[in-house]
Amino acid sequence: RNVSIEHVDNDMLIAYRKWDEETSEQLLIVVSMDPKHSQAGWVTLDSGIADIPDDGTYAVHDLLNGHTHEWSGRRNYVVLDPSGPTAHIFLITNATGALPGATRA
């Protein structure tokens, strides 16, 4: 319930989103299926479900490493390297601007 598989253009990455209807909190989880090589790809969020602006910016906060990034639109680039965490758990913050301290990912 309240889970959506999101499109990734790299078959070695899987992405899914989980949300809470009461709080509107959304998590985007991206996981590498390759424990030996870096993997990268474009994740495209379903805007009909995600309430993500097509052309606006919003923040994603990685709960695993504490970094916050500014994303733009529904399609964004991710990189996972086996020398670090092989997953991202992003808390999506809808906003018209970036959160303080955010970096462009």
Image: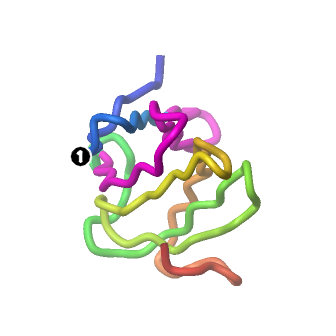
Q: Position of residue 32 (x, y in %)?
A: 48, 38
Residue at image location 43% in from the left, 58% down from the top: 78
Residue at image location 73% in from the left, 49% down from the top: 64
> Does residue 28 sit above or below 96 in this rendering?
above
- Viewer-proximal residue among 14 and 102: 14
Q: Quadrant of residue 53?
A: bottom left
Q: Position of residue 63 (x, y in %)?
A: 72, 50
Badge 1: residue crowd in 10 Å (few <14, some 14–19, many ≥20): few
Left or right placement of residue 44 versus residue 29 in this view:
left
Under circle 1, the secondary element is loop
Residue at image location 57% in from the left, 71% down from the top: 69
Q: Position of residue 3 (x, y in %)?
A: 44, 25
> Does residue 67 sit above or below 8 in this rendering?
below
Magenta range is 18-45
For label 1, the residue is: 9
Q: Is residue 104 magenta?
A: no
> Does residue 22 sit above or below 9 in this rendering?
above
Q: Position of residue 35 (x, y in %)?
A: 54, 34
Q: Is residue 27 magenta?
A: yes
Left or right placement of residue 13 versus residue 31 in this view:
left
